[in-house]
Image: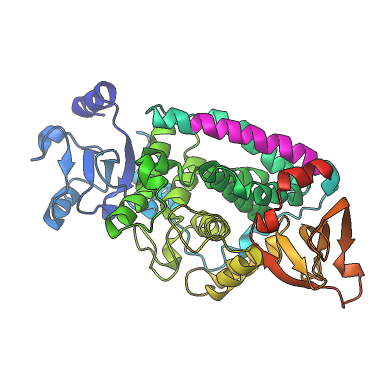
């Protein structure tokens, strides 16, 4: 590498990504070129702020790859980001490297994932005790991560990886326990529970799709970090109880690019470029939508990576079922959210993924509150694969809405059809406290 580029590497802490020059846009900041001495170009030594399409055309004269400083401007779309190049690579190997990290447009990408089959190996009653401890540990770890970021410290992935590994182990053994925890914590502090429950939905979805354990762990980690960029936003914006103004909405949407920058900085010197590139793509595209209506890149379906599609569905489901300070309509019941997602298949989300997500968590997901036609109220604890509308339910309230003691579990799939679920309920309805219920269970 030339002396100027070496000086830039050693004297500055540049938070940069290597990108194909085709991904450059106005507003990006190019910190250096690849295999080209800045002294041989008309550009200033400190780098180039792209102000026009003409600037991009001039840069193209000096090679196919550049380094973009994501602290000083937006990041390129994920499809154009590649791993760090080894100086011994040939041109053909460089092209192959870009293909390895670019977005798959294979229409059969989902079918190729169905490699493993998982069975529940522990009963819910056993796994829920482990899940409770794991979930609480992850909350503590996530609180520490957020505190570090608010103090402008580097994201420490080591802190959360162990907890994520434990969480995925629990989901692989029996996903119902973690799904129950995700629903149970809906009334807790919004910021942390949203991240954790989205992580649970992502991992559970990966298990259903037959992904390998490492891939499920990456999905879970990505789900946990989707909104890590919000740590850089003003607290009063995050806690606003009013509908966001257009300017506030634009500022809130910036959490995607901020999150990419945080993760890019944390993984700068990592040797596992493939896994971290998938995480970067997941964060960068979790608000993109199949019809191009998402943000920040307005990508269409074929340009959104699978991880981004999975994250978009999981994050949307969790947002719909959560109380958000700046959304006046309130939380949906999980059943209503599933119905809403189904209506968006083929528009905002790929139909096959939506249908697989519904198969993953059920019409009435584990942990969701339901009311029976008898007037009794309870929560779903397990789902029949063949009778999805007739799950097992723990009853909390009797027909007169009085507490049931001791708690009673019924399996609707084994009962006469004159008893059935009449409606789904949002978390906390009728004042039900899941923490108290768990103690009794």
- Whether 293 is drawn above or below 74: the answer is below
Q: Residue furthest top?
A: 11
Q: Which residue lies furthest to the left in this view?
A: 42
Left or right of 22 in this view: 58: left
- Our reading of the magenta stretch's main secondary structure is helix
Residue 331: which quarter of the image? bottom right
- Whether 378 is drawn above or below 271: the answer is below
Q: Residue at x 44, y 65 (%)?
A: 289
Q: Quadrant of the N terminus?
A: top left
Q: Can residue 121 be seen in this view?
A: no
Q: Which residue lies furthest to the bottom in this view?
A: 418
Left or right of 303 in this view: 428: right
Q: Residue at x 57, y 44 (%)?
A: 193
Q: Does the magenta stretch include residue 130?
A: yes
- Whether 308 is drawn above or below 262: the answer is below
- Whether 160 is drawn above or below 249: the answer is above
Q: What is the x, y in percent for residue 310?
A: 55, 58
Residue 295: which quarter of the image? bottom left
The colour scheme used here is rainbow
Q: Which residue is drawn at 48% across and 50% down?
A: 282
Q: What is the x, y in percent for residue 409?
A: 88, 57
Q: What is the x, y in percent for residue 346?
A: 51, 75
Nearer to the camera, 284 or 416: 416
Nearer to the camera, 402 or 296: 402
Tell me where the magenta segment starts and ends, as one range: 127-145
């Amino acid at each position: 590498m030339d002396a100027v580029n070496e000086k830039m590497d050693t004297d500055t802490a540049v938070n940069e990504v290597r990108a194909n020059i085709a991904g450059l846009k106005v507003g990006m900041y190019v910190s250096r070129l690849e295999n080209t001495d800045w002294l041989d170009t008309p550009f200033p030594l400190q780098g180039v702020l792209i102000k026009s399409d003409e600037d991009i055309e001039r840069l193209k004269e000096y090679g196919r790859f550049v380094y973009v400083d994501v602290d000083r401007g937006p990041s390129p779309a994920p499809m154009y980001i590649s791993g760090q190049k080894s100086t011994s690579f040939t041109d053909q190997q460089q092209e192959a490297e870009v293909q390895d990290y670019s977005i798959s447009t294979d229409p059969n990408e989902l079918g190729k994932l169905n490699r493993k089959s998982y069975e529940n190996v522990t009963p819910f009653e056993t796994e829920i005790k482990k899940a409770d401890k794991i979930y609480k540990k992850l909350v503590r770890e996530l609180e520490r991560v957020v505190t570090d970021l608010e103090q402008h410290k580097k994201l420490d992935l080591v802190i959360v990886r162990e907890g994520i590994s434990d969480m995925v182990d629990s989901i692989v053994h029996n996903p119902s326990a973690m799904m129950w925890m995700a629903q149970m914590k809906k009334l807790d502090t919004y910021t942390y529970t949203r991240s954790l429950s989205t992580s649970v939905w992502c991992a559970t979805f990966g298990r259903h799709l037959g992904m390998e354990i490492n891939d499920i762990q990456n999905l879970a980690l990505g789900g946990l970090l989707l909104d890590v960029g919000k740590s850089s936003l003003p607290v009063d914006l995050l806690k606003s109880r009013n509908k966001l103004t257009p300017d506030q909405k634009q500022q809130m949407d910036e959490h995607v690019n901020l999150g990419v920058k945080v993760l890019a900085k944390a993984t700068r010197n990592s040797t596992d470029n493939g896994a971290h590139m998938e995480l970067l793509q997941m964060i960068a595209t979790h608000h993109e939508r199949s019809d191009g209506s998402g943000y920040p890149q307005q990508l269409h379906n074929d340009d959104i990576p699978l991880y981004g599609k999975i994250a978009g569905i999981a994050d949307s489901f969790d947002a719909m079922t959560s109380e958000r300070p700046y959304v006046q309509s309130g939380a949906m019941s999980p059943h209503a959210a599933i119905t809403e997602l189904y209506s968006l298949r083929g528009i905002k989300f790929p139909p096959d993924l939506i249908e697989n997500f519904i198969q993953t968590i059920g019409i009435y997901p584990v942990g969701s509150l339901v009311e029976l036609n008898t007037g009794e109220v309870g929560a779903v604890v397990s789902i029949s694969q063949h009778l999805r509308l007739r799950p097992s339910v723990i009853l909390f309230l009797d027909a007169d809405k009085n507490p049931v003691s001791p708690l009673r579990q019924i399996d609707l799939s084994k009962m006469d059809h004159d008893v059935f679920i009449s409606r789904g309920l949002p978390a906390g309805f009728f004042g039900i406290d899941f923490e108290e219920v768990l103690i009794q269970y």
